[in-house]
Amino acid sequence: MDTVWPNPFHRADALRQATLAARRCGSCCSPRPSRLASAAAHVERQTPMRIARTAASLAVAALSASPVAAIESQALGIVEPLAAQIRQVFACGEWSQSGVSGYYRIVLAEVSQGAGTEVYIQRIQAGDGSSLGLKLVETFPVRELNNDHAQYQVISAKCTGAGARSSVELIATFEHDEGNPQHRIRIALKAPGSYPITDTVLKPQRKR
């Protein structure tokens, strides 16, 4: 049963809206122009109720088919230039000083053609919640480990603890040791510029 329009202009208005919707959909959904043009051409032969339904369908199609441009690999331009000697980078703990706060970033770099590993502690200042607000405040070399006459080679590194009680735990070997025992080195991230270090020589595990 056809809808009775109370005003003769309503039908013309609905027809105009349906045609405009078809045109808009045709402009944003370029892969299917023939289908949209065909739908718009048949609008005039439909009843008022079908015209309204067609307009709604075309509007939904226009929204659902709108292409979304995805930005992939946003950090490629800053990651690709990293030197091959940078072995590992990871965040560990938090710091606060003079009303400014942020987190620590640990950087391990291979030296002496891979015979040693140097360790660096960086302070990253937090911004407004976005990566654009981050700022490198300081790069601190761990001098107890970064010595080309007494080199350590780091086997593994991880962050332990949380917040202000975080520490970096390294498993490493020392070039002047006999028997090549492993060391467990812990760097406490207590406060900016204060990083106490403990070094424990691990006993070899007994073979079962």
Image (spheres, grey):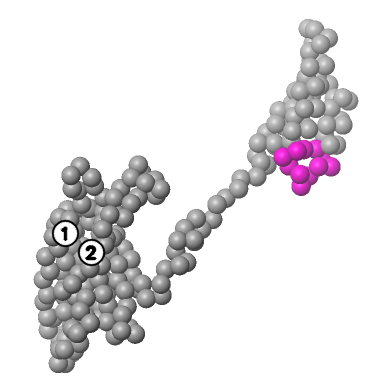
Secondary structure of residue under mark 1: loop
Amino acid type at mark 1: Gly
Q: What x and y, as percent, mark residue 141?
A: 22, 68
Which residue has dot 1 on it? 193
- Which residue is drawn at the image coordinates 33% and 45% (left, top)? 127
198 lies left or right of 115 = left
The image quarter containing residue 158 is: bottom left
Report the amino acid beneath label 2. Answer: Phe
Image mark for residue 48: none
Q: Residue at x 22, y 56 (%)?
A: 93
Residue 34 magenta:
yes
Residue 1 can be seen, yes or no = no
- The quarter of the rendered structure image containing the N terminus is top right
- Residue 194 higher or lower than 204, as above or below: above
Instruction: Using the rendered image of the protein, determine whether residue 38 is visible from the camera's viewpoint.
Output: yes
Q: Secondary structure at mark 2?
A: strand
Looking at the image, residue 96 sits to the left or right of residue 22; the answer is: left
Which of the 4 quarters of the picture holds residue 116? bottom left
Residue nearest the viewer, comparing 79 with 208: 79
Q: Is residue 17 magenta?
A: no
**Among the two numbered marks 1 and 2 on one chain, the one whose residue lies closer to the N terminus:** 2
Cβ–Cβ below 8 Å for labels 1 and 2?
A: yes
Q: Nearer the viewer, residue 92 or 6?
A: 92
By secondary structure, the bulk of the magenta-drawn segment is best described as helix
Mark 2 packing: few (<14 Cα in 10 Å), some, or many (20+)?
A: some
Residues at marks 1 and 2, CA–CA distance in whole angstroms: 8 Å
Q: Residue at x 50, y 55 (%)?
A: 74
Q: As rendered, which of 63 and 93 lies closer to the eye?
A: 93
Report the span colored magenta. Answer: 26-36
- Residue 89: name its quadrant: bottom left
The spot of residue 39 in percent (x, y) is: 82, 34
For disc 2, the marked residue is: 140
